[in-house]
Image (tube, grey):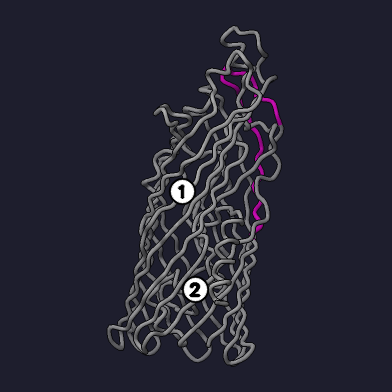
Amino acid sequence: MKNSAIIRFVIFSCWLLTSQAYAAGYGLIEQSASAGGNAYAGGAASAEDASTVYQNPAGMTYLPDNQLVIGAHAILPSASFNNNGSTTAFGAGTTGNNGGDAGDLTFIPNFYLTNAITPDIRIGLGINVPFGLKTEYDSDWVGRYQAIKSELKTTNINPSVAFKANDQLSLGFGILAMRAEASLSSAVDFGTLCTGLGLGCGTPQSRDGVASIHGDGWGIGWNTGAIWQINNATRLGLAYRSQVHLTLDGNIGFSNVPSALATSFPNGNISAKLTTPDSLSASLFHQLNEEWDLLADITWVGWKKFKNLTVVRDSGSIAADTAENWSNTIRLAFGANYHYNQHLKLRTGIAYDESPVSDTYRTPRIPDNDRYWLSAGANYKLSDDNSIDIAYSHVFVKETTLNKTNDASVSALKDTLRGAYDNQVDVFSLQFVHSF
């Protein structure tokens, strides 16, 4: 009953907490504080603790009979925009400030539990937040007609099973039950619409309204993995996570609509399709000697399927449609562990995280670009059964330019946002590990 209460609490917490995307795209790689110290190198092979339920379920066969992991990540991003000649649909300069810092402090929880059924068969449960984003600008910023607030929250419930096929090969499989909730808002330049239509209900940029879209839904996927123990010192891991197809149902609403335009901007029900990407990871763990471990990882992510962000009314008309045209990506990571003594293990790692977003299709909702990770962490054994992990990562984001003209927006006005972002991220991770 205690475990059931913990699980319910963690699910509730995951639904409440918002998240900013800190891996490429809107992915969240922050699923383990132990792996975080290595910049997530070797995750599919290291089988460090019960967080392997997410990294590679086959790794459960390397753990003690039963293990509980509770972790959290404090993520502090900075995303500052500098305007450089943004214009309205009719070529006039767009008024407004630079939007402030679009990033905000966020907390991401993780929960993992594993149990030995037999010496060769393990089951596990993971509850985590594998995808998410949040950007929020000042309501009167220069890019308000393209984005004010963008938020995606997910919660993933991941039951898994693993077994040892023989002394060298372990296999694992899991089910992904994912809930997603999304909210989008942007300003609508009703003043320019009134002027262009000759309705006399406002002047350009003088009568803004706000369009708000919200939706949520569930989807099902799966993950699988294998670990091959080459020898006592070296093992290889391979892990795959499937796509999850979700339909988000919700509503669209407008504020401050002039009466002359009321019939053109009705509130109503909407839906949107969201497909999370599949991924394939290959990892290496090598115990160099009694003091040093070496880790490496390459991960492919199938972002190419994200072609459009389309919101459709119940009537079948398009409420919003933004071309995304993302590309598949590769993430490379290398790490090392130093066993200082029987109680303390030190970690470090570096990574290159490729962005799926090109300069042509970058939007202020996800002003993403290539990033470089520098990480450090430690594990300290409090006793034979308990330990804690801490980790810190600084993420350097490549200078990011933006030159985006609205697609089929809620107002159909083709304003253009031009400028550049200065982005960076700090990630602080902490987890408690209990074996029993």
Upstream in the sequence, badge 1 or badge 2? 2
Compare residues 334 and 235 and report the one nearer the observer. 235
Question: Badge 1 is on which residue?
Answer: 217
Q: Any magenta on residue 185?
A: no
Q: Please, what secondary structure does the residue beneath circle 1 have?
A: strand
Numbered badge on residue 260: none
Is the residue marked by circle 2 packed among few (<14), some (14-19), or many (20+) residues within 10 Å?
Answer: many
Q: Say if 280 sits above or below 182 in the image.
A: below
Q: Position of residue 244 (x, y in %)?
A: 39, 54
Q: Residue furthest left?
A: 165
Q: Which residues are magenta?
A: 75-96
Q: Amino acid at mark 2?
A: Ser
Q: Position of residue 211 (x, y in %)?
A: 59, 31
* Total numbered circles: 2
Q: Amino acid at mark 1?
A: Gly
- Spatial CA distance of label 1 from label 2 is 26 Å
Q: Residue at x 67, y 21 (%)?
A: 205
Q: Please, what secondary structure does the residue beneath circle 2 have?
A: loop
Compare residues 54 and 307 and report the one nearer the observer. 54
Question: Badge 2 is on which residue?
Answer: 51
Q: Quadrant of residue 168?
A: bottom left
Q: Quadrant of residue 331?
A: bottom left
Q: Position of residue 318 (x, y in %)?
A: 43, 29
Compare residues 169 and 178 and report the one nearer the observer. 178
Cβ atoms under marks 1 and 2 closer than 8 Å: no
Q: Nearer the viewer, mark 1 or mark 2?
A: 1
Q: Position of residue 436 (x, y in %)?
A: 53, 88
Q: Say if 362 sits above or below 370 in the image.
A: above
| Rendered-image quadrant of the N terminus | bottom right
Q: Residue at x 58, y 47 (%)?
A: 399
Q: Any magenta on residue 90?
A: yes
